Amino acid sequence: MRNSLEKALRYGDMLEVMYEAKDGSISKRKIRVLNIHGKTFTAYCFLRNSKRTFLIDHVLAVVPVSVKEKVLI
């Protein structure tokens, strides 16, 4: 997971992650990684519309989000 997060940070990519909260609940979130610090990372979370801190070990899955340009005719 860490490699995927570092790559997204380097290239500014948006990710979709499955994340397990401390209470065991699981959520799917779209994020943009801002910083990585040891066992945690900070990202802008589009679900909560705010900057959040996440535990790397609680990320269950990571998928890059592809944003395609729409062409207007």
Image: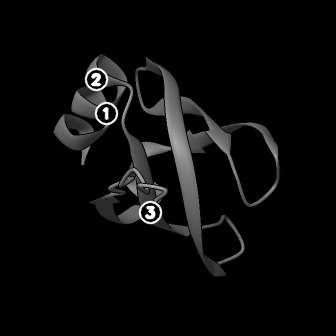
In the drawing, what numbered circle is on residue 30?
A: none
Q: Which mark is residue 8?
A: 1
What's the distance in space between the residues labelled 3 and 1, CA to CA?
A: 12 Å
Amino acid type of disc 2? Tyr
Earlier along the polypeptide chain: callout 3 or callout 1?
A: 1
On the image, the x and y values in percent for residue 63 come to 29, 62
Q: CA distance from mark 2 to mark 1?
A: 5 Å
Q: Residues within 10 Å of mark 2 (few under 14, many from 20)?
A: few
Residue 11 badge: 2
Q: Tell which residue pokes out farthest to the front in this image.
A: 73
**Rendered residue at 32%/56% (across/down):** 66
Say which element carries label 2.
helix
Q: Is residue 44 left or right of residue 63?
A: right
Residue at 49 percent of width and 56 percent of height = 72
Q: Which mark is residue 17?
A: 3
Residues at marks 2 and 1 touching, judged by CB atoms closer than 8 Å: yes
Sequence-wise, the earlier of marks 3 and 2 is: 2
Q: Quadrant of residue 38?
A: top left
* Amino acid tagged 1: Ala
Residue drawn at (72%, 74%) of the image: 23
